Amino acid sequence: MMQNVHLAPETDEDDLYSGYNDYNPICDIEELENDVAFQQAVRTSHGRRPPITAKIPSTAVTRPIATGYGSKTSLASSIGRPMTGAIQDGVTRPMTAVRAAGFIKAGLRGSAFDPLGQSRGPAPPLEVKKKDSPEEKIKQLEKEVNELVEESCIANSCGDLKLALEKAKDAGRKERVLVRQREQAATPENINLDLTYSVLFNLASQYSVNEMYAEALNTYQVIVKNKMFSNAGILKMNMGNIYLKQRNYSKAIKFYRMALDQVPSVNKQMRIKIMQNIGVTFILAGQYSDAINSYEHIMSMAPNLKAGYNLTVCYFAVGDREKMKKAFQKLIAVPLEIDEDKYISPSDDPHTNLVTEAIKNDHLRQMERERKAMAEKYIMTSAKLIAPVIETSFAAGYDWCVEVVKASQYVELANDLEINKAVTYLRQRDYNQAVEILKMLEKKDSRVKSAAATNLSALYYMGKDFAQASSYADIAVNSDRYNPAALTNKGNTVFANGDYEKAAEFYKEALRNDSSCTEALYNIGLTYEKLNRLDEALDCFLKLHAILRNSAEVLYQIANIYELMENLSQAIEWLMQVVSVVPTNPQVLAKLGELYDREGDKSQAFQYYYESYRYFPCNIEVVEWLGAYYIDTQFWEKAIQYFERASLIQPTQVKWQLMVASCFRRSGNYQKALDTYKDTHRKFPENVECLRFLVRLCTDLGLKDAQEYARKLKRLEKMKEIREQRIKSGRDGSGGSRGKREGSASSDSGQDCSASSKGERLSAKLRTLPGTNEPYESSSNKEIDASYVDPLGPQIERPKTAAKKRIDDDDFADEELGDDLLPE
């Protein structure tokens, strides 16, 4: 191997780079005089040029010299040095430059060695472009137009539609200026058609999103009619969309079909989308048969979920049972194209496991979840739509749908359909069938078991069977600890038993599992209110108000908490928001009247009490307040109608008829008052106050009936005295511990009676009326309790707060604490 290795000699006897300074006679101009070809060239084309002198010796390349006979010979060095690139004695001379570095004519004249040419100074500046030139103006204008189009698109994506439209208009104006400048520059062939198309298309889009449909259609027409724009016909689909928004269905279908004709058959997806738009337009126009033809074609060419669902809806609209079944089967058969196996790691390889974990929640996986959720939504909605009509009963229809779903790729939806079947039974008030189905589902897997137990718990809770509700709530929680509905129902049962602290813990756990569980958030607010933790309750309801902006229940609870905090102005403000949501709710209107009454604003209180009475004239407390208000303002005739209404609502209460008679008497209608007192005496013959009124009024009117009524009054008073004496003697005869117990019981009974009478009496103070010898118009200022009436009849001085304290908390709790019966 070493025999092929050649070592470099220590000394090079033949220096290959020697002889560069030798003089070459080829460069001598004297030799040119003998060159016939050169002399001929000088005399013909270069005769006027001065002769070239080359007296400076330099290294020259070997080049052929033309002779007068057309032959070319190579001249060698005069001293026998080999030419550059020549071969001599088997050694090739290396190629060199035309002249050696640094050896120039300036070097012979005494200048310094400057191979890089640094002594020549800096390079001259670049030539400045003229900004005023037409080409530069056109380029700058094009750049501005592009920037305006981009800014318009960005503003649109940010939601600032007005700014996007303004930018699009500016781009359109500048683009027209650009076209005029190109025409003036006599270069119309250089017009940028792509820029013009983008400007017009963006302008039309911005007109459309700003609901300026006429301007958008005109702009699209400009693009479509311009033959210079290729593939502009597809924009007729956008024009069809605009006509669809204007509910001009015939024109929308016309433009959709024109756009369909413009799309080549190879662009299959675009054609399918246009046909879907045509089908939707036919549905909106009520032409279901034409819509069926469109969707049948789509399902035969490229089946998809939306087309299958719309086809089922169309067959439901025309009432074709068999076609509904076939359309539902086609919808079930649409492939999802989702591979669930790739998210399951088949081996224990750490790298494979990391990759699997990384793709379990990436954007593609989220898209697959959304597609699957949309498919399940379409299938469930279609099943609920057609199940009641495809068979003789909705139960048989649900059974058919369940069997079809079980045989498809959506097996897990069969249990959800069973739960929907139970919910349908509930809506038909067939609770036994609903409970039976839910109990059957209770034996399924944990997810279905939890959902069924949750609904059973809600059913028993609404039926006030709290023990069963608690039992099924426990089953639901044990099956799925992260089910917020199950935890909410468990909290409801604890709330019903009065253990508010424990109920709050269940609600908190439900919120930890699902922060959007509005039922748990509402109920925990009620729980804090029961615990008198008003600040925390207010925070809960304000959070809920941020989620449910127009919920009347939430707004009312906020107002109620402000009332409990004695912040009446804030309570009134929130109740006004409730009225804006439910303007005809009589309880809310009565509550507003109560708060204004407490504030001292009688006119506003009367307005809201009257509105409440107008929507619900059977609220005895509102009727009482209005009657007392008119008595206080001395409008006796107007007060009569409200007390008559009260006597109809509570016919067993004698006080309302006495108030009617008193109003007649105060208004001067004595005969009507007498008739009313007589009618009251016939209904309540043992009422002492009514007899006193009759005796007094008959005596003043000089009627003979006065004596008869006086005898009845005397007999009743005597019976009353005897009864009181018996009661007193019975109390005196009792002694010892028995007497104490009886006294205690009597005291308790007295308290109960007092409370009962307080609930029945008027919520107003009554003034004593004039004595026997005084005229009816005068009155004294002595105040007595409303349960005791003077002989001349009651007169209400001033109404108290008579409206209901607030909407019953228990009513709201029963509605909101009961969980939604839809499947979880």
Image (tube, helix red, strand yellow):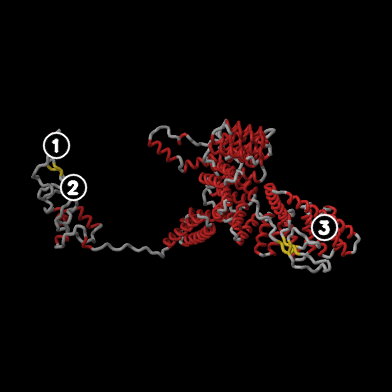
> Crowding at label 1, few (<14), some or many (≥20) Cα neighbours within 10 Å?
few
In this orientation, which residue lies closer to the viewer: 187 or 594? 594
- Classify mark 3: helix, strand or loop: helix
Task: State the residue position of label 1.
Answer: 5
Q: Quadrant of the C terminus?
A: top right
For the residues carrying marks 2 and 3, which lies nearer the camera in this image? 3
Counting residues from the start of the chain, the first of labels 2 and 1 encountered is: 1
- Percent from the top left, x then y, of residue 343? 45, 36
In this orientation, which residue lies closer to the viewer: 297 or 537? 537
Choose top left, top right, bottom left or bottom right for residue 637.
bottom right
Q: How many marks?
A: 3
Disc 2 to disc 1, how far (Cα)? 25 Å
- Percent from the top left, x then y, of residue 442? 58, 33
Q: Is residue 400 above or below residue 194?
A: above
Disc 1 to disc 3, how far (Cα)? 147 Å
- Classify mark 2: helix, strand or loop: loop
Please state which amino acid type lies under the numbered disc 3.
Answer: Cys
In this orientation, which residue lies closer to the viewer: 626 or 65? 626
Disc 2 to disc 3, how far (Cα)? 145 Å
Q: Residue at x 42, y 38 (%)?
A: 356
Counting residues from the start of the chain, the first of labels 2 and 3 encountered is: 2
Of all residues shown, which one is farthest toward the right? Answer: 704
| Label drawn at residue 56 | none
Task: State the residue position of label 3.
Answer: 690
Q: Could you tell me if residue 257 is visible in this image?
A: no
Task: State the residue position of label 2.
Answer: 95
Counting residues from the start of the chain, the first of labels 1 and 3 encountered is: 1
Q: Could you tell me if residue 597 is visible in this image?
A: yes
